Amino acid sequence: MSDLFNLTVEEHADYAIIRTEGYVNNLGGERIGEAADQLIEQGVKKLVLNFEKSNVVNSIGISILIEVIEKVVDVDGRICFCFLTKTIEKTFNIMGLTQYAEIYETEADARASLA
Amino acid sequence: MSESHLSEAKRVTRPVVNEVELIIPMLPDMEITATQTACSVAQYMKFDPDRIDEVKMALVEAIINAFEHSKSQDGKVRIKFVIADDSLTVVIQDHGKGFEINSIEKPDITQKLKAEYKRGWGLMLIENLMDTVYIESSEHGTTLVMSKNRV
């Protein structure tokens, strides 16, 4: 499973999109964290995380997402998630992530909110 | 079979319990294997897809807790799916060192954002995703029993 995790990064003028594919566990979370760190170091303050191809997460992976949220909050940035399954969205709500991260149905909606 | 044997057989007949049992080794991502069984059982019971997803997520959390914290000598987690008319009960059992249930603090996102240790969400998620949760833990191991109603 872990070997199947992939992500791609698409950079725009003032935001970036991270599209994930596969199980967001400790390894998947670390991959997202590394990509986000690099973008934030480059000065990117707005991130879109597209989970269209990630329909399984665990709390270890989400804990790493909390680190990413912390770093985005520290630079007064914004982080948007899109294409979450109902259960992942419910999980984010239970954990309170939605106090610090925005959730959109589609990537287009997330991008429009950042425009 | 003689008549006396038949009556003996009748006396020991117990109510049928519909269960599916699974034993998984503590190996990376083996929790996903268990969710596939959970999915099959819940589909058989005609759970709707969203409720199946919630059972799967709770099961992932219960299993990774056992993997990480039990320090089980036998390196295995036993999972039992109990099928009832209106609910699915999942029993997750390890033979590890157990833990003090009252020592678990409820995590808070605002505190976790600034804290070094950002984990500790598993039990809270299980309790919110399932309808009933019961935990028993001792130095001989931990048993978590969680149920989800079909509707």
Image: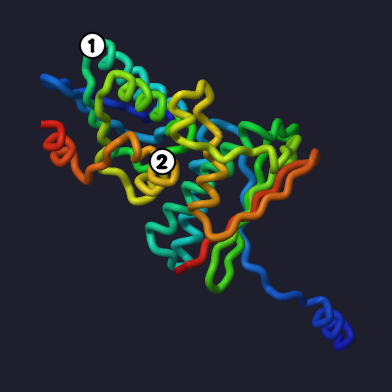
Residue that extends furthest to the top in the rendered view of this protein: A42
Q: Residue at x 43, y 33 (%)?
A: A62
Q: Which residue is mark 2?
A: A96
Identity, as a three-letter code, of the amino acid under mark 2: Gly
The answer to whether residue A25 is visible is no
Left or right, A41 with respect to A1, comes to: left
Vertical order, B142 against B41 (above or below): above
Q: Report whether B2 appears left or right of A80.
A: right
Q: Is residue A32 above or below residue B18?
A: above
Q: How is the image coloured?
A: rainbow
Q: Earlier in the sequence, mark 2 or mark 1?
A: 1
Q: Quadrant of residue A21?
A: top left
Q: Which mark is residue A42?
A: 1
Q: Can you give x and y, in whole percent of width and height, for residue B143 in the image?
A: 70, 48
Q: Amino acid at mark 1?
A: Gln
Q: Residue at x 21, y 18 (%)?
A: A44
**What secondary structure is found at the residue carrying circle 2?**
loop
Q: Evaluate whether label 2 is on the same chain as label 1.
A: yes
User: What's the CA distance linking mark 2 and mark 1?
Assistant: 28 Å
Q: Chain of mark 1?
A: A
Query: Can see residue B36?
Result: yes
Looking at the image, residue A58 sits to the left or right of residue B21; the answer is left
Q: Chain of mark 2?
A: A
Q: Residue at x 35, y 20 (%)?
A: A71
| Numbered badge on residue A1 | none
- Closer to the camera in the image, A28 or B146: B146
Q: Are marks 2 and 1 in contact (CB under 8 Å)?
A: no
Location of the N terminus of chain A (image quadrant): top left
Expressed as whole percent of the image width and height from the top left, the position of residue B22 reads 62, 50
Q: Position of residue A103 (x, y in %)?
A: 27, 41
B81 to the left or right of A83: right
